[in-house]
């Protein structure tokens, strides 16, 4: 059953130099219990998409158009009070920096208990019991004693675990995770990814995992959506998209992963996408990737639609097909 439907979402920011269109016509659906990976370079619009769904875009930003329907309820246009009733209870967000969730001058117990009491009428003792249970669920040892501590008494990885525990307190229907493991070492990152997979299965939540790390998505997500310059350029089942990319940008991202360079032989140069990401203030009418693309042609002067190709959607007039896609995957 479809939990979230994002249709033609458009988010923009007013700047001195003009209007910056960070998200342009993004559309996707998410089923209950499904994990969607949202990937792309910095500035691709993936984080702004997550903030837009949560209703956390502040002036000078605004949602300029489109629809976000959560469990049949339209979120675009709702008041702050209406959105606050959903946030934390039915929709939760995990930020890249856990200190965006945690208050440095309040104990973990105070923050977690208040989070429970904000949405449910239960006793403080019951709220505390839930907090202890949530900390234990994310792998924090001696959760009862750690409750009394303050955020600065935790390591970076432990603070992120606390932030995840707070997000899971109400067993939300939807969790949006915005690069929550980027600043962590590989060992801690692996532990948190394992725990997130386990928790999503146990709770049955749907998850949007925003990242630039394709290796994370390969092991975590059911589907992946690749964003470039504010638009989705390819989406579909994770195995299909990562094993046989159809969009040249998706291929470029995969070629840039060091692990994928092994197949080309020892000493081979790491491939990278030429050029720089375009300014969102100066985008022309055509495909935003055309100046960096080795397959660009005359038709790329117009914006291609997101068309269905081999179990996925691709926004490209000249997609990789057959042998070309296999060669790209093999390197």
Image (cartoon, rainbow, N blue to C red):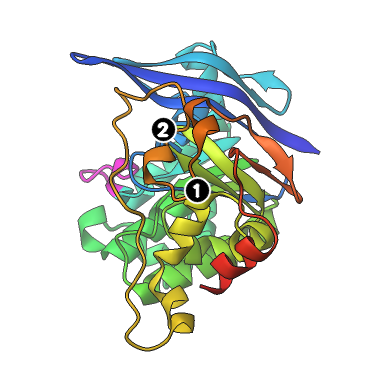
Helix, strand or loop at label 1? It is: loop
Q: Quadrant of residue 278?
A: top left
Q: Nearer the viewer, mark 2 or mark 1?
A: 1
Q: Quadrant of residue 7?
A: top right
Residue sitting nearer the eye, 19 or 220: 19
Residue drawn at 73 percent across, 23 percent down? 72
Residue sitting nearer the eye, 120 or 213: 213
Residue 177 magenta-drawn?
no
Question: Farthest right residue?
Answer: 1
Label at residue 322: none
Q: Is residue 91 above or below residue 110?
A: above
Q: Counting other residues with Cα less than 10 Å from the Cα at mark 2, is it few (<14), some (14-19), or many (20 or more)?
A: many
Residue drawn at 51 percent across, 32 percent down? 298
Look at mark 2 in the image and give the residue it sits on.
48
- Locate residue 55, reporting x and y percent: 47, 23
Residue 102 magenta-drawn?
yes
Residue drawn at 76 percent across, 36 percent down? 2
Horizontal side of residue 101 vs 243, given as left or right: left
Q: Is residue 128 visible?
A: no
Residue extent of the magenta highlight: 99-106
Residue sitting nearer the eye, 83 or 8: 8
- Locate residue 32, reporting x and y percent: 73, 44
- Locate residue 173, reporting x and y percent: 65, 41
Label at residue 295: 1
Distance between the Cα atoms at labels 2 and 1? 29 Å
Marks 2 and 1, the one that precedes in the sequence: 2
Helix, strand or loop at label 2? It is: helix
Query: Would you say the magenta stretch is mainly helix, strand or loop?
Result: loop
């Amino acid at each position: 059953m479809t939990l979230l439907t994002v249709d033609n979402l458009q988010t923009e920011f007013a700047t001195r130099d003009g209007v910056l269109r960070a998200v342009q016509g993004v559309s996707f659906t998410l089923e209950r219990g499904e994990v969607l990976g949202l990937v792309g370079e910095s500035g691709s619009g993936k984080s702004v998409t997550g903030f837009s769904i949560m209703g956390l875009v502040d002036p000078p930003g605004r949602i300029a158009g489109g629809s976000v329907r959560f469990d049949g309820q339209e979120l675009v246009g709702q008041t702050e009070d209406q959105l606050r009733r959903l946030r934390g209870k039915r929709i939760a967000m995990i930020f890249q920096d856990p200190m965006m969730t945690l208050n440095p001058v309040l104990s973990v117990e105070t923050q977690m208990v208040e989070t429970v009491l904000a949405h449910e009428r239960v006793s403080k003792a019951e709220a505390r019991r839930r907090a202890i249970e949530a900390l234990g669920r994310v792998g924090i040892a001696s959760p009862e004693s750690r409750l009394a501590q303050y955020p600065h008494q935790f390591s970076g990885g432990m603070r992120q675990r606390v932030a995840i525990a707070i997000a899971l307190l109400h067993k939300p229907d939807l969790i949006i995770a915005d690069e929550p493991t980027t600043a962590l070492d590989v060992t801690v990152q692996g532990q948190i990814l394992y725990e997130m997979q386990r928790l999503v299965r146990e709770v049955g939540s749907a998850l949007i995992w925003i990242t630039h790390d394709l290796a994370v998505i390969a092991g975590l997500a059911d589907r992946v959506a690749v964003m470039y310059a504010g638009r989705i350029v390819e989406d579909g089942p994770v195995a299909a998209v990562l094993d046989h990319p159809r969009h040249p940008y998706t291929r470029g991202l995969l070629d840039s992963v060091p692990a994928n360079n092994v197949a080309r032989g020892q000493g081979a140069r790491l491939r990278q996408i030429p050029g720089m990401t375009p300014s969102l203030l100066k985008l022309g009418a055509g495909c935003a990737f055309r100046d960096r693309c080795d397959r660009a042609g005359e038709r790329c002067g117009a914006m291609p639609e997101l068309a269905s190709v081999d179990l996925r959607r691709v926004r490209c007039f000249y997609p990789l097909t057959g042998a070309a896609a296999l060669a790209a995957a093999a390197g």
